[in-house]
C-alpha cells in the first residue's frame, strides 16, 4: 500500500530548467513522475532535496538582483 500522507509540493507552476528541475517546486522531473509511487520516507527525502534546490535558485537570483519566484 502506498502512503499518501506526505502532500505534493506542486504549486502548479511547472516549468523545467535546463537540468529538468521544476522552477515552481524544485523537484527533478524523475521525482515529479515518481511521486505517486514513492513511499512516505521517499517523499520526505524528495521534499528535502527539492527545498534545497529551490533555496539555492532563490539565492542565485537574489545575487543577480532578480526579485521574484
Image: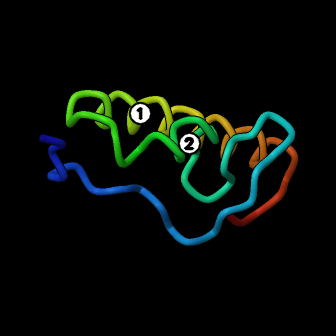
Work out which quarter of the rendered image holds the C terminus and state it: bottom right
Would you say the residues marked 2 and 1 are in contact, meaning their CB atoms lie under 8 Å apart? yes
Locate residue 43: give its quadrant: top left
Which residue is painted at 12% across and 41% down in the image? 1
Q: Residue at x 86, y 39 (%)?
A: 18
Instruction: Locate residue 30, reporting x and y percent.
Output: 58, 35
65 relative position to 11: left or right: right
Determine the residue positioned at 64% across, 34% down: 56
Helix, strand or loop at label 2? It is loop
The residue lying toward the viewer, choosing from 15 and 53, is: 15
Mark number displayed over residue 7: none
The percent position of residue 17, horizontal first and vertical second, equals 81, 46
SS at badge 1: helix
29 and 51: which is toward the camera: 29
Query: Colour mode?
Result: rainbow
In the displayed structure image, the side of residue 12 where residue 49 appears, left or right: left
**Location of mark 1 (residue):** 46
Q: Which mark is residue 27?
A: 2
CA gap, disc 2 to disc 1?
Answer: 7 Å
Amino acid at each position: 500500500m502506498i502512503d499518501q500522507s506526505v502532500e505534493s509540493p506542486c504549486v502548479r507552476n511547472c516549468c523545467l530548467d535546463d537540468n529538468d528541475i521544476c522552477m515552481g517546486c524544485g523537484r527533478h522531473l524523475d521525482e515529479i513522475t515518481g511521486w505517486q509511487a514513492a513511499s512516505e520516507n521517499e517523499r520526505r527525502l524528495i521534499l528535502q532535496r527539492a527545498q534545497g534546490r529551490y533555496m539555492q535558485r532563490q539565492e542565485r537570483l537574489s545575487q543577480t538582483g532578480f526579485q521574484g519566484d
